[in-house]
Image: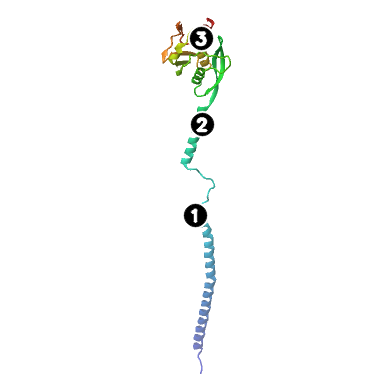
Amino acid sequence: MMVSPRRIGVVLTVAALLVLNACGAATLEQSAITTAPATAAHSVATVATVRPAATGTTATPRSSARVPPASTASSAASRVTSDTATRTASAQIPVAVYFTAGNSLVKETRQVPATSPARGSIDALLAGPSGSGHFSQVPPGTRLLGINLAAGTATVSFSEQVQNLQGSPAIPLFLAQVVNTLTQFPDVQKVVLEVNGQPLRSLGGEGVAVPEPLDRASVQQMLAGT
């Protein structure tokens, strides 16, 4: 049986197409195999890259320093202020307190509150001397009712017992005790005396005049005249 050349050509063409199709399918399959691992590797790499970044983003570093609450800090500041005020109120300073020995003045040292040294010194004067041979001309029972400092003058109010003072040189010595004790302070140059808040004009049964105001010079003159 004779096959015509034309039929042979058609068969060859069909065979070539079948071969080409087979090769194309194999190429596509190989391409899919090659691409899949790459894609998977890329996904893994992406996950490996993204996860640390996400972890780093959400994590917040913790500070080792602890900030105290505002209420605690305020309480601590209040305690410091209170402690400072307490120490200031309890601070003591040395002052001179004048007493008598014969017809002369002698001084002793006392510790008084730093916040009110003038009042503290008069309180110490009324408490009396501690030195041997020292005396005070302050009448027994005399109390300090008040003391006011203004414009270099200390106004001192005693209780009525101060009027029991009698004779000379007791009166000038008493006045000198008060004046010298108060004028040791730089802000006191003169002294005014009162009894129960009223000006003290005289003392004793003799009615010895009390100058107003008193200073160291005036009491020294009174002492010189005794």
Q: Which residue is mark 2?
A: 84
Instruction: Depth check: give the residue in front, 59 or 152.
Output: 152
Instruction: Depth check: give the residue in front, 113 or 29.
Output: 113
Where is residue 167 drawn, in percent x and y? 49, 7
The amino acid beneath tag 1 is Thr
Badge 2 crowding class, 10 Å Cα cut-off, few under 14, some 14 to 19, many 20 or more, is: few
Looking at marks 2 and 3 on the same chain, the residue that comes earlier in the sequence is marked by 2
Instruction: Depth check: give the residue in front, 111 or 12.
Output: 111
Question: Can residue 110 be spotted in the picture?
Answer: yes
* Disc 2, SS: helix
Q: Which residue is mark 3?
A: 170
Looking at marks 3 and 1 on the same chain, the residue that comes earlier in the sequence is marked by 1
Q: CA distance from mark 3 to mark 1?
A: 92 Å
- In the image as oriented, which residue stretches furthest toward the right? 132
User: Label for residue 58?
Assistant: 1
Q: Are marks 2 and 3 in contact (CB under 8 Å)?
A: no
Q: Residue shown at 53%/64% (left/top)?
A: 44
Q: Are marks 3 and 1 in contact (CB under 8 Å)?
A: no
Q: Residue shown at 48%/35% (left/top)?
A: 78
